[in-house]
Image (cartoon, rainbow, N blue to C red):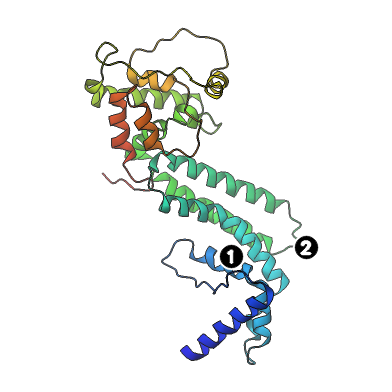
């Protein structure tokens, strides 16, 4: 069996080499205990569609049932579209060395939006021409319910940690709560939670302006000046900032380089928010997809 499998693999590689001169690929197996395994398998099969067809043409009788129809390949294409964001976010979370808990709610919201978009696209399909689309709609509905189940684990006793982590990302702060699904009430609630948590646990670490000079927050480049201007457009208000936590939340977000890891951002702004930096290090150290049990 091993010898036959090796020969079949060599034949597949040969069929690829007849089509192109790039790196030759082997098939990927579906491993149930490995994240993205099914997606990787389908994606590789789609990549090798023509070599696979040519490979099957030269196999011994009895393997004809392995050939996929054009409709089968079309279904796989839809499956790739459906699963791609899940695979991409899983890979990014698994490969990053930076904090991830600050993006947990962002990931969930993005996946919910993706499933809503896919569901809407499927509902516009003609069921008479594509009767199989109902299977995908069922899959999307089932996936949405499972995602809600996982999302619910970021609530309850651990909700505060996820909210604080989101706000401790200097590139988003309270901006994460500006989408319609949150609303002003949640923004106000989490703002109070943020300040209260800092006051109860980190206020004693704060230094006054007389104790230690704060790092300048005045933009030093034209990019910085106009970026800050765009972030602060609106009616001027009298600042009522009274502490470090409020000062941080009301300052413009930092977005000049989207690739800077959040922990590096905190090293940069720590002189301006020394006690809040300690809070950030403690909370952002929590793995993004952890489930807290109390």
In this rendering, does residue 116 appear at all?
Answer: yes
The residue carrying mark 2 is 129
- Residue 95 versus residue 21: which sits nearer the camera? 21
- Residue drawn 30% across and 15% down? 213
Q: Is residue 58 above or below residue 232?
A: below
Q: Locate residue 139, reporting x and y percent.
A: 58, 59
Q: Secondary structure at mark 2?
A: loop
Q: Locate residue 39, reporting x and y percent.
A: 54, 63
Q: Where does the C terminus fall, quadrant-wise? A: top left
- Residue 211 versus residue 27: which sits nearer the camera? 211
Q: Is residue 34 above or below residue 194?
A: below
Q: For the residue carrying disc 1, how many other residues have a C-alpha within 10 Å: few (<14), some (14-19), or many (20+)? A: some
The residue carrying mark 1 is 43
- Residue drawn 54% across and 44% down? 110
Q: Secondary structure at mark 1?
A: helix
- Residue drawn 72% across and 71% down? 70
- Identify the residue at the far left of this view: 204
Q: Locate residue 167, reporting x and y percent.
A: 41, 30
In this rendering, does residue 1 appear at all?
Answer: no
Q: CA distance from mark 2 to mark 1?
A: 25 Å
């Amino acid at each position: 069996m091993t010898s036959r499998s090796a020969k079949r693999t060599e034949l597949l590689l040969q069929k690829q080499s007849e089509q192109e001169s790039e790196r030759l690929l082997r098939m990927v197996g579906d491993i149930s205990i490995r994240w993205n395994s099914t997606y990787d398998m389908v994606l590789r099969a789609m990549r090798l569609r023509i070599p696979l067809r040519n490979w099957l043409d030269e196999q011994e009788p009895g393997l004809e049932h392995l050939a996929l129809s054009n409709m089968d390949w079309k279904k796989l294409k839809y499956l790739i579209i459906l699963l791609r964001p899940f695979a991409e976010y899983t890979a990014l979370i698994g490969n990053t060395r930076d904090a991830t808990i600050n993006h947990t709610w962002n990931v969930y919201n993005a996946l919910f939006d993706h499933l809503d978009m896919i569901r809407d696209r499927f509902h516009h399909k003609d069921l008479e021409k594509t009767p199989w689309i109902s299977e995908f709609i069922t899959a999307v509905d089932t996936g949405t319910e499972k995602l809600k189940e996982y999302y619910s684990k970021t609530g309850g006793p651990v909700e505060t940690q996820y909210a604080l982590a989101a706000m401790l990302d200097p590139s988003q702060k309270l901006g994460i709560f500006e989408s319609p699904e949150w609303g002003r009430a949640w923004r106000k609630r989490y703002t109070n939670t943020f300040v209260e948590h800092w006051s109860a646990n980190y206020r004693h670490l704060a230094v006054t302006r007389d104790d230690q000079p704060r790092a300048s927050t005045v933009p030093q480049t034209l990019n910085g000046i106009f970026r800050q201007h765009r972030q602060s457009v609106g009616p001027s208000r009298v600042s009522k900032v009274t502490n470090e936590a409020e000062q941080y939340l009301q300052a413009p977000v930092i977005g000049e380089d989207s690739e800077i890891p959040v922990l590096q951002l905190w090293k940069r702004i720590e002189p301006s928010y020394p006690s809040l930096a300690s809070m950030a290090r403690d909370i952002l150290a929590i793995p993004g997809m952890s489930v807290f049990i109390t």
